Amino acid sequence: VKKAGKAQRGIGAAIDQAVVLGAGIMGGGIAYTSALHGTSVRMKDIRQQALDLGMAEADKLLARQVAAGRLDETRAAKVRAAIVPQLDYQGFDRADVVVEAVVENLAVKHAVLREVEGEVGVETILLSNTSSLRIDDLAAPLARPENFAGMHFFNPVPVMPLVEIIRGERTGDAAIATAVGLALGMGKTPIVVKDGPGFLVNRILSAYIRAFLQLLSDGADFEEVDRVAEAFGWPMGPAYLEDVVGLDTGSHVCDLIFAGFPERMPAVPGNAFKALLAEGRLGQKSGAGFYRYEAGPGGRPR
Ligand code: 3HC
């Protein structure tokens, strides 16, 4: 265990140095939003290509801010420079907080969290952006579980205001205070929730998505369901929303919640997610999900 690289922080103190693990849709969004709000961020991934994509997305978002007159070029360059993409653990010993946003797989997250815990200071708070894995399960291999909590962002991170902060059985107050401070510093609305499959938001969302899957299994057309949901007032119908989230993530979240509450939310026979995933259709990120996308991520369905 490395010694903390700075004086002991008080609970709720400002966060200067953050690390984000994973430069995908969520990790990239968290890194960009933190930097935009004045926190220096090291964004680590195991693939250079992922880092390049994460930085390209940050460039695109910053260019939009400049074009909209919300940032000048100098400030945009400063925000860009506040995100340091890296493949190694440089600077981890000085991090106040690490937000893990790697693939939603317990074994992978265990390996990553355990390794990172050995690289950071004893005071550093580790937060997982898991969408549905239990915090107590994720904390199992950690030497300092009191410094660990969940911090669940929603997609797209730069615009969705809510962040769920999840307290595990062994999570300490300093971890919760740091997560709340980070969320507030990012301009988000944090809520602290209990641990359990799907936490709060995905528990609600999965009931809606389950009804959608059941409708498809009954023979409904997904585009029609989207049209109706959007006419009703949802910003995106369920098919398009799941394409944006990623069908691999969406399907995994539903599986965990259905398994967690088998009597309330039994699994849906002929689950459309499985059929699409079997064809390699992961949603926007792979160019096709329920819809096909011409312009890659961010493109509208056709
Ligand atoms: N990244 C950054 N900014 C984005 C963006 C993205 N991917 N997509 C849209 N925006 C911004 C736009 O730039 C625009 O900003 P501006 O007004 O400052 O210029 C603003 O959002 C509105 O965009 P649009 O007018 O183009 O489009 P909409 O009015 O449809 O809004 C939306 C886009 C906010 C994404 C809206 O469609 C929405 O709320 N969709 C539902 C999203 C949702 O439910 N997310 C939760 C998913 S579940 C989840 O993440 C949990 C996980 O565990 C599974």
Image (cartoon, helix red, strand yellow):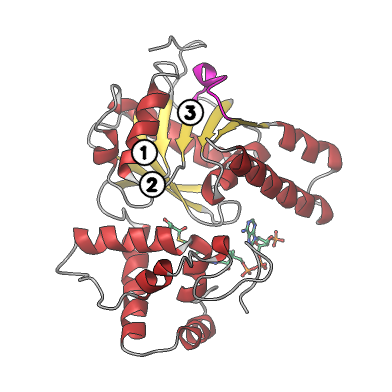
What range is drawn magenta here? 87-97
Element class at badge 1: helix
Specify which label sits upstream in the sequence, 1 or 2: 1
Q: Can residue 90 be found in the magenta stretch?
A: yes
Q: Main secondary structure of the magenta part?
A: loop
| Residue 202 lies within the magenta run | no
- Left or right of residue 218, residue 99 in this image: right
- Residue at 51% of width from left, 68% of height from top? 243
Say which mark, if any, is on residue 96. Answer: none
User: What residue would you read off at disc 3?
Assistant: 97
Whether residue 150 sits left or right of residue 24 in the image: it is left
Q: Is residue 221 left or right of residue 299?
A: left
Closer-to-camera residue (128/247) = 247
As measured in the structure, the alpha-carbon distance from the residue carrying label 3 to the one carrying label 1 is 16 Å
Residue of label 2 = 130
Q: Are marks 3 and 1 in contact (CB under 8 Å)?
A: no
Q: Position of residue 104 (x, y in %)?
A: 38, 48
Query: Distance from label 2 to label 3 (Cα)?
Result: 16 Å
Residue 218, relative to residue 178: is it above or below? below
Dot 1 corresponds to which residue? 109
What's the residue at 51%, 66% (across, down)? 283
Amino acid type assigned to the residue bearing label 2 in the image: Thr
Disc 2 packing (10 Å; few <14; some 14–19; many ≥20)? many
Contact? badges 2 and 3 (CB < 8 Å): no
Ligand 1: quadrant of the figure: bottom right
